[in-house]
Amino acid sequence: MVTTLKTQIVAQDVKGAKATLAKLRPKVNSARDLTSDPIWRAGEVVPFVGPNLSAVRTLAGATDSVVVDAIDPLVGLLDTVSPDSIKPVNGAINLKPVIAATPKVDAAAAAFAKATKQVESIDTSSTIGPVTKATKQMAEMLTKVDSQVVQVKNALHVLPGAMGADRPRNYLIVFENSGELLPNGGTTGSMALLQLDNGKINLVKQSSASGRDFPAFSDYVVPIPEDVKKLYPYGLGRQVQDLTITPRFSLTYEVAKTMWKTAKGDDIDGVIAMDTVTLGNLLKATGPINVLPGLQINSENAVRILLIDIYTMYPDPATVDKINQTISVGAFSKILGGGANPKALLATLLKSGEEGRVKMWTGNKAEQDLIKQTPFYSEPPVSTADTDKFGVYFMDQTPSKMDYFLKAKVDVSQAVCSDKHRYVFTRVALNSTAPANAAEILPPYVMGNGVLVAQGYVQIGTSVYAPKGYKVLGTAIDAKPSAAPMIGTDGEYTVAQGVQQMGPGQTMTLDVLFDAGETKTKKLNATVTPMVNPIVTTYGTLDCAAIGK
């Protein structure tokens, strides 16, 4: 019943949660009373029986404490703190319910923490199977929920400040073009400056990333590590279009903050970036937007129109910039005016965050510590004791808008071979689904520059980030070994790079072989630059004979 109640709370099912709680209260009260009377306590000193009675008493008391001191108050908050209750109305979010809820959530978090310690202290070395199983089950549930409640507690403490309760906050929203890939998303298309002042939200400024609205810089606007300069020699720290050319969103934040201050004069407290796919999905929550007479954008047509059709319909780049800004501002205007479905909006943002399409960074440490626990945190993946994590990042080198047609398959396989070394092999296959007559039906603005590009080709620079301690043994393009493989570092990461160039209908592979040294087999995981099309990621076993090991 506690598990059911948790599900109902997460789903904002107020009626269901209250009904379940009403049934649960008398049960936990009865269990606590039955296991805390003198006869029960006396039985705890009986050999063999005692440890079981003691464990059951502790479980009953912990459950009662969780229900009375934690779950009951949290259910009571469902009426006042929910996506519906804190959605913007006339451009402002009411922070009072959040502030009022904070003490109750603090108390609930303390109750969960206390109960978790109580259950973890139970000695199950002498208990019978059912008691041992129940103890383990409750300990696992409490540990998970305790962590989640702590996150909610932390969020409530920092949210008012982030919304400008103590002083106005400026957030730069960066809209990325998914048709022109960069390692952490896509090229910057347009930007909007939002100011939050005690819950009131204002759109202060807008700018496209084109040279018509935003300058390029002749030198790096912030210090860039030398090894990173070698990996990304063009654009990083000098062109606003390339804000997400690095997979480190912390660096993106520093660059964006400095560039905007220099070009527009405003101090920035945080940066939020989202790609075209996210913007299109937001329209599920906001409804369609009328952009120009006869042009309506909705969740079904947004990505295709914004990445391909817009260029054939409006050849003038200035008109394209205007449309992109109109769409992004139109979506935000509906959200800020309360015209968006809050649950659909939240679900869309969370899903996009999990796919790497929405990223956030703030200069406030407490707020950034919270973001680090969410899907919106974006840095190269950190390996753990049992999992080696890789990053596979794409950068359009054409440049064109043809990445709308790209599909990707990433396979990571491993084996410990006869020399006792563990070898990891990554294969990145990129396929262009561009129409054969792309050059005839798409404008030069989409195709890019150069002879091959004019024929519908797209050129992608792929970077494969491996964990610390990995050594690159070699790379190959379409199974042809590279005579001089491009190998570098980004801080603690070993990085192998290769260039893949595909015409319409073609597939090209980049292979990288790593030596992980004399280490045991681990789980493998790869984070990949999000594309318009879904990415297929697989993990397998490497054939040592195939690599001569």
Image (cartoon, helix red, strand yellow):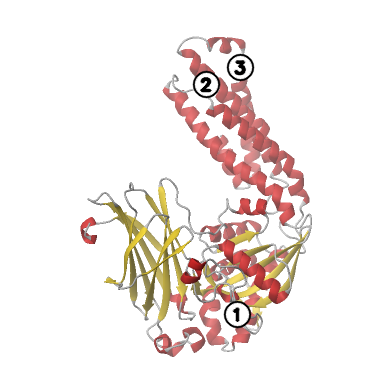
Q: Which mark is residue 525?
A: none
Sequence-wise, which precedes: disc 3 or disc 2? Answer: 3
Name the residue rendered at 73%, 48% in the picture. 98
Q: Which mark is residue 36?
A: 3
| Residue at position x 60%, y 71% in the image | 175
Residue 130 seen in this snapshot = yes
**Depth order, front residue of 549/435:** 549
User: What's the residue at 37%, 73% (across, down)?
Assistant: 431
Q: Residues within 10 Å of mark 2 (few under 14, many from 20)?
A: many
Find disc 2 in the rendering and name its residue: 55
Task: Count residues near mark 3 (Cα–Cα under 10 Å), then give few for <14, some for 14-19, many for 20+.
Answer: some
What amino acid does circle 1 point to? Ser
Q: Mark 3 and mark 1: span between their CA atoms?
A: 75 Å
Q: Is residue 519 above or below residue 497?
A: above
Query: In which image quadrant can residue 287 be found?
Result: bottom right
Task: Tell us which disc is closer to us: 1 or 2.
Answer: 1
Quarter occupied by the N terminus? top right
Query: Can you identify the residue that label 1 sits on?
Result: 218
Question: Viewer-nearest of labels 3 and 2?
Answer: 2
Disc 3 and disc 2 in contact, CB within 8 angstroms = no
Q: Amino acid at mark 3?
A: Ser
Label 3–label 1 contact, CB within 8 A: no
Q: Specify the quadrant of the image occupied by residue 75.
A: top right
Quadrant in which the C terminus appears: bottom left
Between the C-alphas of marks 3 and 2, the distance is: 12 Å
Q: CA distance from mark 1 to mark 2?
A: 69 Å
Mark earlier in primary sequence (3, 1): 3
Question: Would residue 196 be found to the left or right of residue 524 on screen?
Answer: right
Please, is residue 470 above or below residue 232 in the view? above
Q: What's the residue at 45%, 20% (across, down)?
A: 127
Q: Is residue 316 left or right of residue 391?
A: right
Q: Is residue 85 visible?
A: no
